[in-house]
Structure formats: C-alpha cells, structure tokens
Amino acid sequence: MNTTPNTPDFEALDAAIKAEAEEKMKIIRVVATAHKELLDTREEFARKDAANVGNLDAALTEALRVGFTESSIKQWRVDAPSKKAPARRSATRRNTTTKPANKVKDSIPAKESTSEQSA
C-alpha cells in the first residue's frame, strides 16, 4: 500500500504560472507599443493632411481670385477623405435551388415486374 500523500508540488505550479504570466506580459507590451505607435502615426498624418488641404484650398482660392476659372484648376482639386470606410461587399450567396434527382438510379436497369416475368 502506498502511504505517500498525494500533495501537489506548489513550487513547480507557482513557477509554471509565473513563467506563463511573464510571457503573456512580454507580448502584450509589444502589442500595446505597436498599437500606440500606429495611433500616433495616424494622428500625426491627419494633422499634416489637414494643414496641407488648408494650404491647397487657400492657394486655389487665390488662383480663382486672380482670374483662373474653376475648370482650369479642376485638376488640382482634392476630395476630402471620407471618415467612413467604404462599404464592404457582401459575400456572394450560393445558389439555393434544389439539386437534380440522383442520376445513378436511372442508370441501373429496373427489375422486371412479376407480370413481365410470367408472360
């Protein structure tokens, strides 16, 4: 009969849990840093873009003031970026018509009926 107690090795469990937690913390720091850099870059771009659009609009207004026509400067106009992402196209649906009858059945010769056999 085995008399050793069935006690877990708490030190090994602690070490395993701490190692897993440290690995998770390491990767989440990388994720958080990448996310912050992405948001900062986008914000900086948006500021620069807004300033550039303002400069272009001012220059185009000045061009109109000095005698250019709208059609002559049309090529320099830039549409403002939309805040909303373009709509996603829905996935094409499969045709839901019923499947044709099983053709294998038609290729197997039918058994002769008992009336045909007796004739």
Image: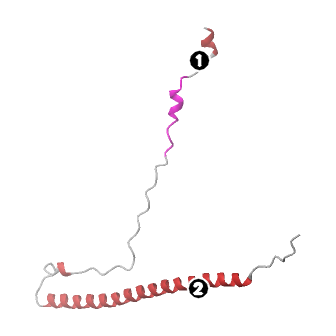
Residue at horizontal 46%, vertical 87%?
A: 33
Residue indicated by mark 1: 112
Name the disc covering residue 25, or none. Answer: none
Where is residue 80 drawn, in percent x and y? 30, 81
The residue furthest front is: 1
Residue at horizontal 60%, vertical 13%?
A: 116
Quadrant of the snapshot with the C terminus:
top right
Name the foreground residue: 105 vs 98: 105
Residue indicated by mark 2: 22
Does the magenta portion include 45? Answer: no
Name the foreground residue: 39 vs 3: 3
Where is residue 3 drawn, in percent x and y? 87, 75
Q: How is the image coloured?
A: secondary structure
Labelled pair 1, 2 in contact (Cβ < 8 Å): no
Residue at horizontal 15%, vertical 78%?
A: 71
Amino acid identity at mark 2: Glu
Please tell me how crowded label 1 is: few (under 14), some (14-19), or many (20+) other residues with Cα within 10 Å: few
Please tell me how crowded label 2 is: few (under 14), some (14-19), or many (20+) other residues with Cα within 10 Å: few
Dot 1 or dot 2: first in sequence order is: 2
User: Would you identify the image quadrant in which residue 44 lies?
Assistant: bottom left
Residue at horizontal 49%, vertical 83%?
A: 31
Amino acid identity at mark 1: Glu
Where is residue 101 drawn, in percent x and y? 52, 36
Where is residue 38 drawn, in percent x and y? 41, 85
Name the foreground residue: 75 vs 106: 106
Q: Secondary structure at mark 2?
A: helix
Q: Which residues are magenta?
A: 97-109
User: Would you identify the image quadrant in which residue 75 lies?
Assistant: bottom left
Rounded to the nearest angstrom, the CA distance separating label 1 from label 2 is 78 Å
Which SS does the magenta portion mostly show? loop
